[in-house]
Amino acid sequence: MSINVAFFADSNRKSVSQPHNEEIGEVCIANISPLERKKRLKFAIGQFIVTLVVLGVLIALDLNPLWRLPLLFLFSAATTSYFQVLDKT
């Protein structure tokens, strides 16, 4: 038997922007090395170029636009790698 408990914020607070003793700001510790970031960036750029070339070929051959749908996976791989480089994760 499990018991679900909900905790709510204190309703007695006068202001949301009260100063806290906590440090304000964001600390980011890189999760991947600079070499790995370079590899991911190269992959992202290469994947994006390959995807654009395939898209150009599909448009030039005047194929059914539904054939372009699988390119979503190629674009998503490129963007995921690129955002991993930016976020250093």
Image (spheres, rainbow, N blue to C red):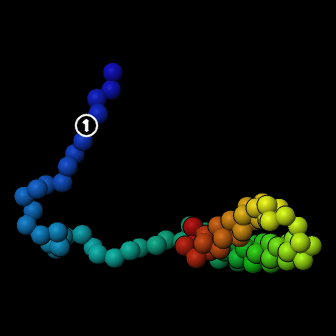
Badge 1 local density, few (<14 within 10 Å), some, or many (20+)?
Answer: few
Where is residue 3 drawn, in percent x and y?
28, 29
Where is residue 70 drawn, in percent x and y?
78, 60
Residue pictured at 65% horizontal, 74% vertical: 82
Please state if 51 lies on the left or on the right of 78 as rendered: right
Please state if 51 lies on the left or on the right of 85 as rendered: right
The quarter holding residue 73 reads: bottom right
Q: Amino acid at mark 1?
A: Val
Residue pictured at 41% horizontal, 73% vertical: 27
Q: Which one is nearer the viewer's eye here, 29 or 49?
A: 49
* Above or below, 3 relative to 40: above
Where is residue 17 drawn, in percent x and y?
17, 73
Residue pictured at 20% horizontal, 49% vertical: 8
Screen quadrant of the C terminus: bottom right
Screen quadrant of the N terminus: top left
Q: Which residue is mark 1?
A: 5
Residue pictured at 29% horizontal, 75% vertical: 24
**Label 1 residue SS:** loop
Q: Which one is nearer the viewer's eye here, 88 or 1?
A: 1
Residue 4 in view here: yes
Q: Residue furthest top?
A: 1
Please state if 5 lies on the left or on the right of 56 as rendered: left
* Above or below, 11 relative to 17: above
Where is residue 72 drawn, in percent x and y?
72, 64
The quarter holding residue 75 reads: bottom right
Residue 46 in view here: no
